[in-house]
Amino acid sequence: KNQVEQSPQSLIILEGKNCTLQCNYTVSPFSNLRWYKQDTGRGPVSLTIMTFSENTKSNGRYTATLDADTKQSSLHITASQLSDSASYICVVSGDDTGGFKTIFGAGTRLFVKA
Amino acid sequence: EAEVAQSPRYKITEKSQAVAFWCDPISGHATLYWYRQILGQGPELLVQFQDESVVDDSQLPKDRFSAERLKGVDSTLKIQPAELGDSAMYLCASSLRGVAGVPKTQYFGPGTRLLVL
């Protein structure tokens, strides 16, 4: 079972609307969680990074939340733009059998329509 | 703003041929990563360097893949011989040295898209 699960797998929204992407993880103990945006054919770009003690982190129209008790994170995008069309990847770092690991989710593919 | 450089951006090769990718990390970043990303999936770590030393290559198919970072700066990833299933995006990332085992934010290059025919 993947230790970082993202949902939905893909999402289509209209320009100007808000949306929320989910990330559930089982990595424990947990160190930090990051959200990346990956445009088609490009490398991922970091949006937010949160440690165990942080509940929320914003970067412009992107707001990430973290509930370390339930091991859930969400990325909320406000007033979506066409340029938000991309894959959003949740990345969790923490302890795993064999040492410290960074584990990538499969991503949520977001399509913003005009 | 400093960026991770990768070349080539695209590579088409025939199976059984050798192929090599190059990565130049952000200056001062001690840690360098090579990832493989199959279309529709998240990146999968192939190898991680700390300076010139390999710290994790547990997912690297060592029968055909090799990676080096001889002077602790730029790095090369090689595949020989290439197979059809190697078609993917190969991403390089770098980060500052982590403290007490806690990794720092990774900065990714644009990737090399490989197509094996």
Image (spheres, grey):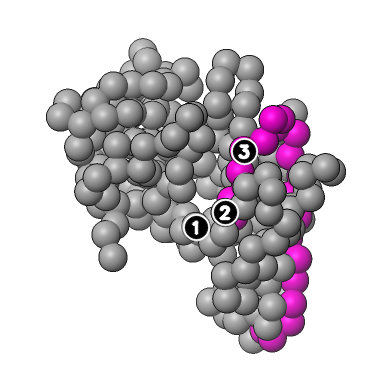
Q: Main secondary structure of the magenta part?
A: strand
Q: Could you tell me the amino acid type at mark 2?
A: Ile
Position of residue B82 in the picture relative to residue A42 (left or right): left
Q: At 20% from the left edge and 38% from the top edge, which residue is drawn?
A: B74
State which quadrant residue A15 falls in: bottom right
Between marks 1 and 3 in the image, the one whose residue lies nearer the viewer:
3
The residue labelled by disc 1 is A46
Q: Could you tell me the amino acid type at mark 3?
A: Ser
Query: Does the CB distance between marks 1 and 2 fall below 8 Å?
Result: yes
What x and y, as percent, mark residue B111?
A: 36, 49
Q: CA distance from mark 3 to mark 2?
A: 10 Å
Q: CA distance from mark 1 to mark 2?
A: 8 Å
Q: At 63% from the left edge and 17% from the top edge, which residue is drawn?
A: A97
State which quadrant residue B42 falls in: top right
Precedes in sequence: disc 1 or disc 3: 3
Q: Is residue B63 at least partly visible in the picture?
A: yes
The residue labelled by disc 3 is A31
Instruction: Say what secondary structure mark 3 lies in.
Output: strand
Neighbor class of circle 1 (other Cα within 10 Å; few <14, some 14-19, many 20+) is some
Q: Chain ID for label 1? A: A
Precedes in sequence: disc 3 or disc 2: 3
What x and y, as percent, mark residue B17?
A: 25, 28
Q: Chain ID for label 3? A: A
Placement of A18 over or under A114, stated as above or below: above
What x and y, as percent, mark residue A38?
A: 51, 59
Label ID, residue A49: 2
Q: At 68% from the left edge and 83% from the top edge, which residue is drawn?
A: A79
Of B116 and A2, the residue lying toward us: A2
Looking at this view, name the residue that lies furthest to the top.
B63
Of A111 and B17, the residue lying toward us: A111
Residue B83 lies within the magenta run: no
What x and y, as percent, mark residue A109?
A: 64, 59
